[in-house]
Image (cartoon, rainbow, N blue to C red):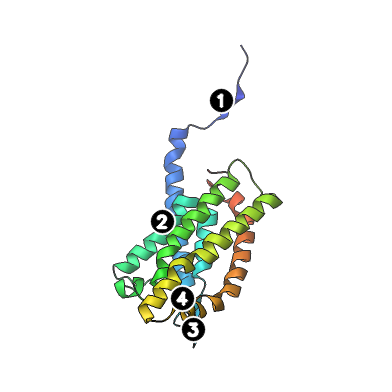
Amino acid sequence: MPYSTESSTSPNPGATQPIHRLRGIVYTALFAALFIAFSWVQIPLGFSPVPVTLQTLAVMLAGGLLGATYGFWSIAIVVLLTAVGLPLLEGRGGLSTVFGPTGGYIWMFPISALLIGFVSDRLFRGSGRLNAWRIAVLAAAIALFGVVFPYVAGVPWLAYKLDMSFAKAMAAGCYPFIPGDTIKGVAAVAIIALLRPLLPGLRGRG
């Protein structure tokens, strides 16, 4: 009878499942902390109520490196804890932060991480390093879901809260940030393409 090396070397899925869950919890906590830390890195703009921060970079990395599920929860947990009063975003917390002028951006961050993670999970499924075509797809996902998507809710909510026209809200809460977001997007693509294949438990995970 032929000898099967696959059956003798394949790990027991049931035995490794708790390890993957624990690893996922650790990753989620680490990237939640990263999101909090990056929110403290900010440059106020005198003409805009929206400061320049590294929050969007943390969102891109969470989705791209952790995937849809863990990426979403690493950001959503911070938003929920901020809503109940913990001063986690730029040292502020409570409903006044989550529903303040910049609230529209904050709501979209978990969804952005989810969508970036959805694409990243499929690009890295069954493969290690990404080829040029897959890197291009990852860059497009980062640009759409990480750069453009937060403005979909952020700008209209900013206009509503500050009683300004949509054009003024775009000038105050979108246009000045596009160059910086583009740089963060390029950095995120490079980091994700380099590091995700090396993350234990996430390589090729679909």
Circle number at residue 8: 1
139 lies left or right of 102:
right
What residue appears at the point 54 percent right and 44 percent down from the top-left corner?
205
Identity of the amino acid at label 2?
Answer: Trp
Query: Tag 2, which secondary structure?
Result: helix
Q: Earlier in the sequence, mark 2 or mark 4?
A: 4
Query: Tag 3, which secondary structure?
Result: loop
133 lies left or right of 143:
right
Q: Which residue is mark 3?
A: 44
Identity of the amino acid at label 3?
Answer: Pro
Circle number at residue 40: 4
Q: Earlier in the sequence, mark 2 or mark 1?
A: 1
Q: Earlier in the sequence, mark 1 or mark 3?
A: 1
Q: Earlier in the sequence, mark 1 or mark 4?
A: 1
Query: Tag 1, which secondary structure?
Result: helix
Q: State how far apart marks 2 and 3 are (Cα).
A: 28 Å
The residue lying toward the viewer, choosing from 163 and 130, is 163
Q: State how far apart marks 3 and 4 are (Cα).
A: 11 Å
Q: Which residue is mark 2?
A: 73
Name which quarter of the figure residue 191 lies in: bottom right
Closer to the observer: label 2 or label 4? 2
Residue farthest to the top? Answer: 1
27 lies left or right of 5:
left
What residue appears at the point 51 percent right and 67 percent down from the top-left corner?
56
